[in-house]
Image (cartoon, coloured by chain):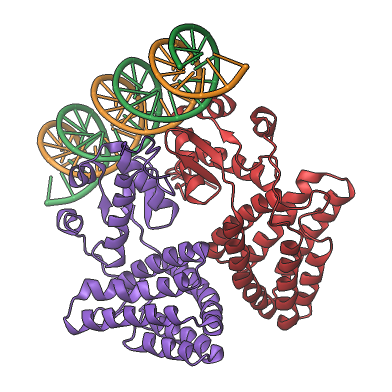
Chain colours: A purple, B red, C green, D orange
Amino acid sequence: MAPPKQARHAQETSFSSDPDEKLIVERIYNAVMEQRLAPNTKLSESRLCDIFGVGRMRVRRALLLLSSQGIVELKSNRGAFVACPDQDEANDVFEARLLIEPPLVRQLALLRSADLLELLSAHIAREDAARATQERTEMIRLSGEFHVRLAEATGNEVLVRILRELVTRTSLIVGLFGVSGQSSCPDDEHMGILEAIRQRDPERAEQRVKSHLEHIRSGLAMDGRKDRPDDLYNVLGEV
Amino acid sequence: MAPPKQARHAQETSFSSDPDEKLIVERIYNAVMEQRLAPNTKLSESRLCDIFGVGRMRVRRALLLLSSQGIVELKSNRGAFVACPDQDEANDVFEARLLIEPPLVRQLALLRSADLLELLSAHIAREDAARATQERTEMIRLSGEFHVRLAEATGNEVLVRILRELVTRTSLIVGLFGVSGQSSCPDDEHMGILEAIRQRDPERAEQRVKSHLEHIRSGLAMDGRKDRPDDLYNVLGEV
DNA sequence: TTGACATGGATTGTTAACAATCGTTGGATT
DNA sequence: AATCCAACGATTGTTAACAATCCATGTCAA
């Protein structure tokens, strides 16, 4: 048994060139999704270098990628900050979601494959579990990711990317304008959407997504915003 | 009339940090839009440095940004290439457009502001002019940009970004799978869409966009693809 | 006490040299 | 003659030092 002679390149780089790089982006991504990174938080290069144990170049590339998706804002000679959407931006994001997601779910209700239902059902179960055990950050993240799962269910990579970006930015918006005590997604509306899909009722599914998004939007106070600078070490250090 | 006392910083960097940088991205963007840059064309760093008279860093940042939008593909240790979508990717892009654009235009037909009609009408006039004078590249670009204009008409920056990306990738797809002799957008369907909006007929507008996109899609041969490596100098040098 | 101003430290932006990888060319061997 | 192998050239990836900018501190004057 000769050892395999050609293990050419381990894996073709699909999107970001480096595992390290993807990891940095994903960590910050998740931290924003879970609202552990507040808008306007400064993302210092040197700190990120320390935290991730990487050279400055990697960090800068990661920040540039994040900025191209509206998660991070780069200010000339001042550094990178977690994006801080204003009301106009918030409106744009919600209107984009209201435009895209209802037809998307409508389509899902028409396709309605078995494993799709299985997948969404499992996700909702995880949401419930997180809610039961009071894991706030986990719950917030799962709540947002549900909408990404819907996009994934279409098998359309392009839509997944779009939805992921919109959902993440929504997380920032809810963190900024959301009423504190309130969950970002009203509790069991996800289940209602899944039910409509299961019953092959595209009309109702579409309507439920629409009102779901409007509920989230109505939970926002579009005037006051709370600023609380966070500590980077605690936020990005662990998983 | 005192001169304005504070011209603080000339302009806050909105997206890319530098004018030079935006320019590089835009040039390549346009070249792809006009199908002057064929898929799989290698984008050598040193050449781009020469062409734009910029340091390697700027070029690399531009390429990274383009790669994050699916216009360019970065291969480890091999360099940057104009993206070469496969059939799956092409399907995803078209399905995403079919999902997004019809409701978008429907909404436009409901709003129907006067200056909106003016703007679209002017754009179509430019398309006709380009078609009349046989300016192929100009015509291709305008033809694609029409769809971006529709998004701009909503005043939603987020949607504009999404549409711009989708349209550009469509340009790559048409270049790859399109039948050569055929224009990318069937001739006067844009006018038909505008008319439906003008008549406040959301149903018809939506339907026309849908069939318009399907016409474009049906003009593709999803089996054979033509590879023609281009010369960078001629493509990116001028305007 | 308050304001403006200058200086120092820290952080970001840029450049250039260095290291690593890949493709190719040339030669040697079968 | 064809194939494999090795060394070279070219291109990309990385690092580190340098330059420029901003922010804060502290000083001086009103």
Q: From what the image shows, is residue B208 above or below residue A210?
A: above
Q: Is residue A50 visible?
A: yes
* Residue A96 in the image: above or below residue B22: below
- For the image shown, how many numbered marks are present on the structure? 0
Horizontal side, residue A48 vs residue B141: left or right? left
Picture coordinates of residue A158, whole percent (x, y): 52, 62
Give residue B87's quadrant in the image. bottom right
The residue at 57%/46% (across/down) is B83
> Would residue A87 be found to the left or right of residue A1 on screen?
right
Q: Is residue B210 above or below residue B175?
A: below
In the rendered structure, the answer to whether residue A22 lies left or right of residue B144 reads left
Q: Position of residue A91 (x, y in %)?
A: 47, 72
Res A83 quadrant in image: bottom left
Query: Is residue A223 visible from the viewing direction of this image?
Result: no
Residue A206, x across and y down, in percent = 52, 85
Residue at 55 percent across and 88 percent down: it is A202
Residue A119 in percent (x, y) is at 38, 77
Quarter containing the C terminus of chain B: top right
Residue at the image point whose x is 34% and y is 66% from the top: A172
Q: Going by the image, does A3 lie left or right of A49?
A: right
Q: Residue at x 46, y 67 (%)?
A: A163
- Work out whether B237 lies above or below A104: above
